[in-house]
Image (spheres, rainbow, N blue to C red):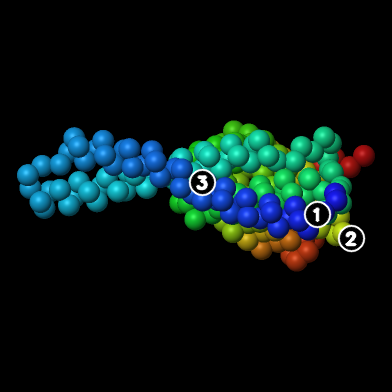
Amino acid sequence: MKNFALVQTVGSGILLVYTIVLWGLPVAPALAVFDLITDLALTDSQGLNYVVYGLTIGVCFMVYILSLLFFSGMSQRVIHVRIPEDKIVDNLESWNTVRWAICAHLHRCTHPVLVHTIPSPICNAYYRLAGAKIGKKVQINTINLNDPSAVTIGDNVVIGGRSVINGHLVEKGQLVLARVHLEKGCLIGAGTTIQPGVRIGEGAVIATNGLVGKWKNIPAGEVWAGLPVKQIKKSSQRNDV
């Protein structure tokens, strides 16, 4: 891309403005709810009104959380980089890099409110809106499911708190986006870091604080631990041929 430095400078300013919109627009429905509830519930008792105000603010904060997650998730869904196969490699000075950086920023903007929704269907719905493919009965206990559009999660997967799942890396002047596959029934321990291109097999376990390096393939049913992870238990269900 020509004049990338100029695009980066101008784009950063535009993104700051959009951040104001992202954080500010969800205030509108929250204020509408505040007016609606207080118009209906306020009484002649000042003490009771304090209770009404307190509860109403709590409701409005939840409306704000839901609105922000929806707005951010939909924005990422529109902007995110499409990965045609398992990975895409592009020059750092490219439009794909710009789109990836915007989505990463939008996701970070949700962190202060997303943390209040994990684990829950609300959190899962946000990640789905942002592009992640998520199966049934999935528990996500982290706000650091980065690059959602590059993550596929099967049924009954549990992702522990503070885990970091990255669908990107930068090396040799290139941006690499690669899909992460967490297959049915696998368990990702708390504090685990999973790098791009990783596939965790069905029913496999990554122990707490493990580091799964890029392009690693963890076979189904096995237990891996360490930094980086190493096999500590083979699958009892595997049939070697």
Residue 185 appears in the figure: no
What amino acid does circle 3 point to?
Answer: Val
Instruction: Count how many numbered circles sit on residues in the image.
Output: 3
Q: Earlier in the sequence, mark 3 or mark 2?
A: 3
Which percent across, then down, holds residue 107?
60, 50
10 Å crowding of disc 2: few (<14), some (14-19), many (20+): few
Gap in angstroms between the C-alphas marked 1 and 2: 18 Å
- Confirm or deny contact between disc 3 and disc 2 (CB under 8 A): no
Q: Secondary structure at mark 1?
A: helix
What amino acid does circle 1 point to?
Answer: Phe
The quarter holding residue 60 reads top left
Q: Earlier in the sequence, mark 1 or mark 3?
A: 1
* Residue at the disc numbered 2: 172
Disc number for residue 4: 1
Instruction: Give the camera-side residue of 166 and 1.
Output: 1
Q: Residue at x 77, y 61 (%)?
A: 229
* Residue at the disc numbered 3: 21
Residue most extreme to the bottom: 227
